[in-house]
């Protein structure tokens, strides 16, 4: 080890240091490898600047390092240390809440029935279009603070509640601004194809697709406002051919692809995502056996959103076990949004992954760290405790990682480190 490296922060005596560095931290975990998460008892990690400089057993690391008098030392005795969590599917920019629709669902109305009655995405879009850039950033900033307090250090952030050129661009500008001022990384996704605006429904759907392809996407690409293009590929929204057309246009402009796929009906969205080389296919509650095989045989990541299934009262969750046992790369996300999953608590989603989808604690940790990093094309930078990666780290108030999903709904993070500096601390 180069003893000339200046160690700024040292975390020692972790009852468990969970590295996710088993395979060098530069490739995602496929299938059953998601259980090979790399645990060091009585572990330590050293940070230099914004990067991880070294890790290992506390005794060994202390014997190898030269510790300066101004090095910040955190004693993590009886606590667990992991990489920062990554939430690879969120909708954090929106106006208003939809608690009235929540009550409608409790009384038995379906998602599609609520949408047909003027609720759903169009309800939020109508209000969001009236927001200024300042409105968007001030409303969304507290949600990001909540995410950080739960141990989330990177999120994917979608537009999609504007559904007009001006409003979609303003949402993406808000995401860019929040990325500059908040202690959390936001990876921007353009989701103009979230729904057909009311003024284009009933015969104007092709015109809206043309607007996306001919006007919105070129501006988004030219101004580098998004890294991904997403489409809500579902019955009653964008069909397979419409989705393919939008995605191919986005790829031509250099954007990567994500898809909302097979959430309500098995349309073949997962298969289309694999065909297009999508970074991820998300939701996939109703994925077909052929879709499972296609995803498992590809590098496309299956991003599962159990909070949405819970909150919508669907009674059915994505087939996580089938996907993992088939060899797929699986990630988990909150799907934070005002209608179908209003939660910023990613550890709670980990609990749902265990209880509702029969994933193990090892697997849900892999799904919210390294695999989630690859679901937002950040796997070379974050997602594991790997030398040279960004120092995004969480110290948890539990002695082992199994207890993070075990204490469901609890706030267990003690210290959240972002880019080598404390971004949040309990109390």
Image (spheres, rainbow, N blue to C red):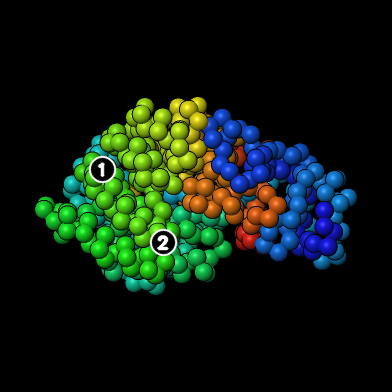
- Of residues 394 and 46, the one nearer the viewer is 46
Residue position marked by numbered label 1 in the rendering:
240
- The residue lying at 34 percent from left, 72 percent from top is 132
Q: Is residue 217 visible?
A: yes
Residue 96 x, y percent position in the rendering: 33, 59
Mark number displayed over residue 135: none
Q: In screen coordinates, is 227 left or right of 99? A: right
Q: CA distance from mark 2 to mark 1?
A: 23 Å
The residue drawn where x is 83% and y is 62% is 4
Residue at left offset 65%, top offset 55%:
389
- Relative image position of residue 131 (x, y in whole percent): 32, 69
Please indicate, yes or no, whether residue 311 appears anywhere in the rendered image. no
In screen coordinates, is 58 left or right of 386? Answer: right
Q: Residue furthest front?
A: 252
Report the residue at 56% width, 50% height from top. Answer: 379
Q: Position of residue 425 (x, y in %)?
A: 64, 58
Residue beneath label 2, please? 226
């Amino acid at each position: 080890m180069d003893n000339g490296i200046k160690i700024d922060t040292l975390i020692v005596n972790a009852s468990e240091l969970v590295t996710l560095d088993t395979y060098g931290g530069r490739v995602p975990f496929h299938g059953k490898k998601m259980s090979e998460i790399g645990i060091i008892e009585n572990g330590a990690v050293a940070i230099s600047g914004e990067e991880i400089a070294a890790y290992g057993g506390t005794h060994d690391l202390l014997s190898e390092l030269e510790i300066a008098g101004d090095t910040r030392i955190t004693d993590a005795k009886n606590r667990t240390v992991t990489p920062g969590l990554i939430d690879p599917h969120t909708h954090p920019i929106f106006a208003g809440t939809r608690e009235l629709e929540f009550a409608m669902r409790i009384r038995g109305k379906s998602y599609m029935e609520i949408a047909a009655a003027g609720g759903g995405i169009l309800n939020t879009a109508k209000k969001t279009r009236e927001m200024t850039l300042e409105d968007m950033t001030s409303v969304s900033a507290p949600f990001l603070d909540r995410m950080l307090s739960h141990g989330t250090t990177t999120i994917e952030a979608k537009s999609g509640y504007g559904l007009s050129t001006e409003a979609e661009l303003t949402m993406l500008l808000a995401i860019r601004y929040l990325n500059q001022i908040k202690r959390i990384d936001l990876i921007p996704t353009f989701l103009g194809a979230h729904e057909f605006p009311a003024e284009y429904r009933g015969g104007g759907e092709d015109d809206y697709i043309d607007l996306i392809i001919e006007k919105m996407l070129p501006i988004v690409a030219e101004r580098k406002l998004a890294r991904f293009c997403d489409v809500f590929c579902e019955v009653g929204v964008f069909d397979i051919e419409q989705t393919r057309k939008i995605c191919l246009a986005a790829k031509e402009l250099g954007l990567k692809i994500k898809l909302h796929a097979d959430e309500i009906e098995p349309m073949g969205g997962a298969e289309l995502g694999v065909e297009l080389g999508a970074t991820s296919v998300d939701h996939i509650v109703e994925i077909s056996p052929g879709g499972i095989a296609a995803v498992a045989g590809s590098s496309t990541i299956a991003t599962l959103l159990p909070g949405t299934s819970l909150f919508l009262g669907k009674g059915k969750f994505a087939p996580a076990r089938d996907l993992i046992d088939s060899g797929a790369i699986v990630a988990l996300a909150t799907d934070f949004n005002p209608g179908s999953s209003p939660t910023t608590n990613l550890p709670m989603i980990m609990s749902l992954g265990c209880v509702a989808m029969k994933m193990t604690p090892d697997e849900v940790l892999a799904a919210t760290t390294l695999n989630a990093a690859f679901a937002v094309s950040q796997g070379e930078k974050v997602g594991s405790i790997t030398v040279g990666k960004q120092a995004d780290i969480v110290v948890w108030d539990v002695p082992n990682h199994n207890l993070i999903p075990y204490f469901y709904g609890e706030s267990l993070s003690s210290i959240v480190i972002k880019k080598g500096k404390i971004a949040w601390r309990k109390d």
